[in-house]
Image: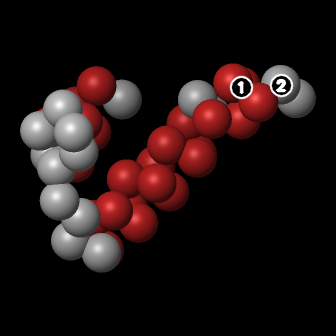
Amino acid sequence: MRLIEKITDVGNIERAINKVKSNKGAPGSDNMTVEELETYF
């Protein structure tokens, strides 16, 4: 599996979003919250 396919795998994205939520992560450099990001996926 190519790296980009691993990164964009739905399961990986869901795990990453859940991890950020559990850590109460702050918005990134684009000022987008995890809740806003989640709507893209």
Q: For marks 1 and 2, give the CA distance.
A: 5 Å
Amino acid identity at mark 2:
Arg
The x, y position of residue 32, in whole percent, is 15, 38
Q: Tell me the residue at 58%/47% (across/down).
A: 12
Q: Which image quarter is the C terminus in?
A: top left
* Visual colour scheme: secondary structure
Mark 1 and mark 2 in contact? Answer it, CB < 8 Å: yes
Residue visible at 31% across and 74% down? 22
Q: Judge whether 25 appears above or below 1 on screen.
A: below
Residue type (three-letter) at the residue carrying disc 1: Glu
Q: Residue furthest right?
A: 1
The residue lying at 17 percent from left, 59 percent from top is 26
Q: In terms of secondary structure, where does tag 2 sit? A: loop
Q: Position of residue 8 (x, y in %)?
A: 58, 29
Circle on res. 30? none
Q: Is residue 16 above or below residue 21?
A: above
The N terminus lies in quadrant: top right
Residue indicated by mark 1 = 5
Location of residue 15 with respect to 10 vertically, above or below: below
Q: Is residue 10 visible?
A: yes
Count of numbered circles in the view? 2
State the SS at label 1: helix
Image location (x, y in percent) of residue 28 = 23, 45
Image-quadrant location for residue 4: top right
Question: Could you say which disc has been placed on residue 2 in the image?
Answer: 2
User: Residue 34: x percent and y percent?
Assistant: 22, 48
Indicate whether 8 appears above or below 14: above
- Residue found at the very far bottom of the displayed protein: 23
Mark 1 Cα shell of 10 Å, populated few (<14), some (14-19), many (≥20): few
